[in-house]
Every structure is written in structure tokens, then in C-alpha cells.
Amino acid sequence: MTLTQTPCVLVIETDESLASQMSLDLHEAGYETFVARDASQGMQYCRDQQPALIVVDRMLTGESGLSFCKNLRNARVCSPILVLMARDAVDDRVACLESGADDYFLKPYRCEDFLKLVRLYLKPDVDTGEQLRFGDLALDIATRRAIQNGRAIDLTMKEFELLKYLMEHPREVLTREQILENVWGYDFMGESNVIEVYIRYLRLKIEEEGKKRLIQTVRGVGYVLRES
């Protein structure tokens, strides 16, 4: 019999009462939980515990929650990140996604909505054996990993979804609107550079220095996955 490991969720929240409530709700829903009071402690927990999901308040003591998200991604932490925010304006959503976070949920805290989002990002992988391939790059759908010349590449949730969308439409020029709608599900555009941010993340991981560029920019239109 194979034992299923309980997913670990890290909550980084300055408000002690809110942190305790979120931790209790997660525990009752079957998750192992760690609580950090600030960004420094949160980063240490990330290194030590390697959580399956990270929940962070946008307003932390001493450091912005969004700055913390950027630091996590720069440190190659690939776990999904959910940001707790007070507002749902377009610029807030854009800032959240551009920070490297995968999603957000709103204050006031509602247990049911929160756990629904947690379950979405922690649903068990179904081993379908399915892979997408393009040249020497393969994408394993079950593990959400890219494999290139035998090298396994860890991807964040949104990096995986973006690469999957590109690999499902090889050599097809995809507009920014198509990418945003199919990967993020939001209909805002404006001055957001969230797509450019994640394209840069992917290029750093799958395009080795000196090698040909796989994800190519079509100026004024969008992006295309092609060999040359």
C-alpha cells in the first residue's frame, strides 16, 4: 500500500488571529500547516520545509508580500503562491501576477473560498503518461516538469500552464490576448507586462546560453514557439 504524503501549506501572515484561523481551517481540511509571522521567517520555512503551497499576505511587516513573492521566484522556489489582498482593482491583480504569484484571494477572509482555491492548486496529479514534445523539449503533464536533453526542469504553476499552451500550438503565432485569456483567465490588458515577465522566466529555464531561441517574440502581436 502506498502512503500519500499530506501536503504542507506555509502561511505567512502578520495578523496573529487571522493566521491562527487560516491554520486551523487548513488543518481541519487535512493539510499540514506552518505559520510564519514575517518574510524572513517565511523564507527560512521555505528552505527547511519545502511547502507544497505558500500563502502570503500582501501587507507584511517590514516587507511587501509582493516583494517576498519576487524573492521566492528569484530563489527558484516553484511552489504555487497565493496572495491575500484587500483590493481587487485591475492594477492590484496585475501587480500580484507580475510578482510571480499564481493567484490571489480577497479580504475579508472567507474559509470556504480560501479552501476552494487551495484545493485547486493542491489537487493530486493524475499520471496520464501524457507528454507534449517540441524539438528536444518535452513537457510531462502529470509532474508539471519540462525535460530537455535528459535534464529535468522545475516549473511554477503558471510557467507550466504558459509553456503547455505554447506547446499545444507550435509554430502558431499567439496574441497577448489569447495567452492572457487561456493561461490567466483574465480579460485585462492595459500596460501589464505579466506575459513578458513569465516568458522571461521560461526562457531562462529552457533556453540555454548560446542555444537557439525557442520562444520568439512577434513584435506588436505576441509570441510563437518555433525552431528558428
Image: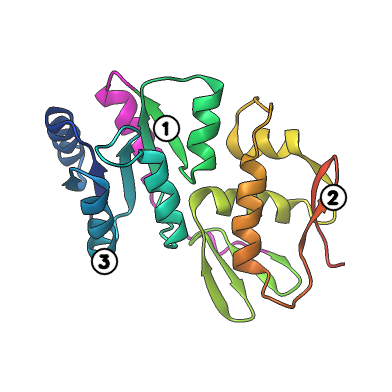
- Eye-nearest disc, 2 or 3: 2
- Where residue 103 appears, x then y in whole percent? 45, 36
Q: Which mark is residue 172?
A: 2
Asked if one can make out residue 37 in the rendered structure from this viewpoint, the answer is: yes
Is 172 situated above or below 140? above
The mark nearer the N terminus, 1 or 3, is: 3
Q: Residue at x 23, y 57 (%)?
A: 45
Indicate whether residue 180 is drawn in magenta.
no
- Give, as a three-letter code, the residue at label 1: Tyr
Whether residue 181 sits left or right of residue 222 in the image: it is: left
- Give, as a three-letter code, the residue at label 2: Glu
Q: CA distance from mark 1 to mark 3?
A: 33 Å
Is 130 situated above or below 64? below
User: Looking at the image, do the residues carrying marks 2 and 3 touch, with CB atoms under 8 Å apart?
Assistant: no
Place residue 225 in its image quadrant: bottom right
- Where residue 138 appears, x then y in whole percent? 65, 68
Q: Which residue is mark 3?
A: 2
Q: Residue at x 61, y 40 (%)?
A: 194
The mark nearer the N terminus, 2 or 1, is: 1
Is 204 situated above or below 196? below
Q: Is the N terminus in the top left, top right, bottom left or bottom right quadrant?
A: bottom left
Q: Residue at x 41, y 53 (%)?
A: 71
Q: Which residues are magenta?
A: 107-132
- Give, as a three-letter code, the residue at label 3: Thr
Figure disc tally: 3
Q: Which mark is residue 63?
A: none
